[in-house]
Amino acid sequence: MQENIRYNTVCIADYYASNRNRWSDFYESERWIFEKIAGPERNMGRILDVGCAVGGLGCALRERFSVTEYTGVDINRQAIEIANSGKSSHPMDNACFIYGDILEMKTLPAEGFDNVFSLSCADWNIRTRDIVNECWRYVAKGGHFILTLRLTAEASVSDLSKSYQYICFGDETEGCMEEYEKAPYVILNIHEAITMLSQLDPKPSGIIAYGYYGKPSPSARTVYDRLCFTALAVTKMDGGDQYPETFGEFHLPMDLLF
């Protein structure tokens, strides 16, 4: 089985050391989902952030909510080194950072986290479905799995030769990008994505989604010129056997759904 790519690009760590660390840095879709899962208690509890870079999400969430503990995992060694050194522009207390592929982790507790996040991670790797299944394993009963996906009403695309993104940021996207590493730019059909999430084991008690159309990243090379960039939250049953009457809440473009 093919392994996920252990990116060596230094610019990943450099970029996230000073970006995506404030509430306002996150997309509207992400902020909407965060508010929904936090609820009136404004409590995020125990967080696992898969694809954490240097931990900016934890800092952003602490601007708005209470966080009991934060554990970050990333496959990029440089990012984890910065996170552990405290040299980023947003060092964080009560946090643990682990270098490695989430699919190879052996020490994290199953069902040990109230909220498991995977933002711009599962669809930026080869084994998207495996990452989704593994993240779900760490969600506590009654907790949530929060992820972002690129969706389309057309056919899914996961072939790296047909859809990929050069790993570069900011002004770098204006020059020649052939020298940069390539990441899979996975795009999922909306119905295939919802089916994948609804068939997680154990079966979820609900899914919410918020998304809107936009153009692919300037550094992406893909078959579609318009995608629905979507944040989703999947809730794990809290132990009850009864399946809920209302399963999904989807704030998505109508032509994507029908």
Image (cartoon, rainbow, N blue to C red):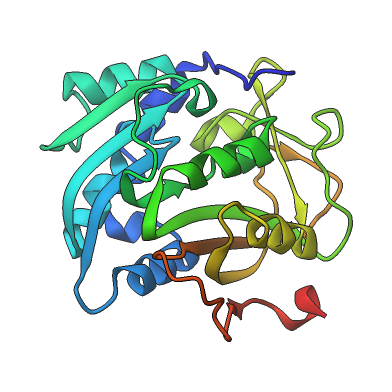
Residue found at the far bottom of this picture: 245
Question: How many numbered discs?
Answer: 0
What residue is drawn where x is 56% and y is 76%?
Answer: 243
What residue is drawn where x is 34% and y is 71%?
Answer: 35
Q: Nearer the viewer, residue 22 or 68?
A: 68
Please tell me whether residue 18 is drawn above or below residue 97 in the rendered image.
below
Please tell me whether residue 3 is drawn above or below residue 238 in the rendered image.
above
**Image position, residue 182 (x, y; %):** 68, 24
Report which quarter residue 247 is drawn in. bottom right
Q: Nearer the viewer, residue 127 or 181?
A: 127
| Placement of the N terminus among the 4 image quadrants | top right
Residue found at the far left of this picture: 93
Q: Is residue 170 left or right of residue 188?
A: left
What residue is drawn where x is 77% and y is 76%?
Answer: 257
Report which quarter residue 159 is drawn in. top right
Q: Is residue 159 visible?
A: yes
Q: Is residue 139 left or right of residue 233?
A: left
**Image position, residue 136 (x, y; %):** 50, 47
Report which quarter residue 66 is drawn in. bottom left
